[in-house]
Image (cartoon, helix red, strand yellow):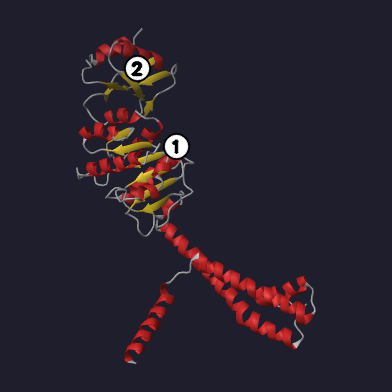
């Protein structure tokens, strides 16, 4: 007897807690709809039979009663008609309708919360930009800069964006969501996560370096690239590499563009998506080895930009990128035949370039 009481107590307790944590699924809602439809049908038949109403009047009376509207234009007057209304509508219909409304709101809120927390698959997303990983430090700020730059790029502004990361289990920052960015909570190195994020349907895939201070991050990136390759994704894949020696390995694994993780300039990453190859040029501008930029403090007056560019190339000095005005402003890529007044030139040279003296360069532009 004590065992039976204990068993019953456990069942009651479990049922009690289930009511507190269980969220009704669409299947439960469908069952209640069917039950409500049955109640409405029975009451409508009762009104036809007991109140001598036609089928539309019976249905109208049933719906106004179940919704507690009660216009009063039609009402049950016989004992059995009123008894049927009490049992079917007051006892069952109104309660069912309230439960359906409650469950519907509950399901909507649950699904919205799961979407915000990245706990659902975005099955309808395709031809999108998939960003894998987020930086370990200051991730919110970097993603804000990156998404803003993508949004400002005409070729990318309308493409959906999804982020696969474990960094935002409670949801992306509101700034990112305001751009229509969604995310899937998970690690790309876990089985099935890339498929859940639609890597096989993406147009662009960006594999970010998790920690720029940890050289092992390249190994994680290499693993992610192999998993993407196994999915035979047609996406243009761009990835970050800490160690330059890993670039050939990344490209052999399927990456079309590889850049260094420069967190202050997400523009470099975006340019590599829409103009592959430019990332190499942009990266070279940030270092002295190889091609790099210098400033020549020469005064020029009354010459066209075309003359400047062609003269520098003919004299094997370098490639002109822009010039410095008297007030210090920098003008890049001016109109070809625009006449300039310059206090300096910004040019691109390589390590082997031999630069004449400033006086000699100035003489090249004098009539």
Secondary element under disc 2, as helix, strand or loop, is strand
Above or below, comparing residue 185 to residue 149 in the picture: below
Secondary element under disc 1, as helix, strand or loop, is loop
Relative image position of residue 203 (x, y in whole percent): 43, 38
State how far apart marks 2 and 1 are (Cα): 35 Å
Above or below, comparing residue 274 to residue 342 in the picture: below
* 96 horizontally vs 220: left or right: right
Q: Nearer the viewer, residue 121 or 72?
A: 121
Relative image position of residue 251 (x, y in whole percent): 29, 32
Q: Is residue 10 visible?
A: yes
Residue extending furthest toward the bottom: 1
Say which quarter of the image contains residue 332: top left
Mark 1 crowd level (few <14, some 14–19, many ≥20, 10 Å Cα)? some
Tell me the residue at 48%/66% (across/down): 25
Q: Is residue 145 visible?
A: no
Q: How many marks?
A: 2
Q: Nearer the viewer, residue 37 or 187?
A: 37
The residue carrying mark 1 is 153
Mark 2 crowd level (few <14, some 14–19, many ≥20, 10 Å Cα)? many
Above or below, comparing residue 88 to residue 271 in the picture: below
For the residues labelled 2 and 1, say whether their Cβ atoms are less than 8 Å apart: no
Tell me the residue at 40%/17% (across/down): 305
The residue carrying mark 2 is 300
Q: Which mark is residue 170?
A: none
Tell me the residue at 35%/88% (across/down): 4
User: Tag 1 or tag 2, which sits nearer the N-term?
Assistant: 1
Tell me the residue at 44%/21% (across/down): 335
* 22 horizontally vs 230: left or right: right
Relative image position of residue 36 (x, y in whole percent): 61, 73
Which of the two discs, 2 and 1, sits closer to the camera?
A: 1
In what quadrant of the picture does the C terminus appear?
Answer: top left
């Amino acid at each position: 007897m004590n065992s039976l009481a204990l068993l019953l107590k456990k069942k009651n307790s479990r049922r009690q807690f289930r009511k507190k944590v269980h969220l009704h699924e669409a299947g439960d809602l469908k069952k209640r709809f069917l039950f409500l439809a049955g109640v409405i049908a029975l009451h409508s038949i009762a009104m036809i039979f007991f109140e001598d109403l036609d089928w539309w009047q019976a249905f109208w009376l049933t719906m106004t009663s179940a919704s507690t509207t009660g216009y009063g234009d039609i009402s049950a007057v016989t004992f059995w008609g009123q008894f049927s209304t009490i049992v079917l509508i007051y006892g069952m219909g109104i309660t069912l309708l309230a439960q359906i409304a409650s469950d519907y709101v509950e399901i909507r809120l649950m699904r919205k919360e799961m979407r915000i927390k990245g706990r659902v698959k975005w099955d309808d997303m395709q031809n999108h930009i998939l960003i894998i990983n987020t930086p370990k430090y200051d991730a919110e700020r970097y993603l804000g800069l990156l998404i803003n730059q993508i949004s400002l790029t005409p070729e990318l502004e309308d493409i959906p964006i999804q982020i696969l990361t474990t960094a935002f289990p409670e949801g992306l920052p509101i700034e990112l969501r305001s751009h229509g960015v969604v995310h899937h909570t998970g690690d790309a190195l876990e089985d099935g996560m890339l498929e859940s994020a639609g890597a096989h349907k993406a147009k662009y895939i960006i594999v970010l370096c998790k920690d720029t201070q940890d050289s092992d991050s390249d190994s994680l990136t290499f693993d992610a690239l192999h998993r993407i390759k196994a999915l035979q994704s047609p996406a243009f894949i761009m990835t970050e590499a800490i160690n330059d020696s890993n670039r050939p390995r990344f490209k052999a694994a399927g990456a079309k563009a590889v850049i260094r993780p420069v967190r202050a300039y997400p523009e470099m990453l975006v340019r590599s998506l829409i103009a592959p190859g430019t990332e190499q040029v942009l990266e070279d501008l940030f270092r002295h080895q190889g091609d790099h930029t210098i400033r020549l403090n020469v005064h020029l007056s009354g010459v066209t930009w075309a003359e400047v560019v062609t003269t520098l190339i003919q004299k094997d000095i370098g490639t002109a990128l822009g010039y410095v005005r008297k007030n210090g402003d920098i003008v890049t890529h001016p109109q070809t035949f625009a006449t300039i007044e310059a206090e300096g030139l910004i040019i691109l040279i390589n390590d082997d370039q031999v630069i004449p003296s400033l006086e000699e360069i100035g003489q090249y532009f004098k009539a």
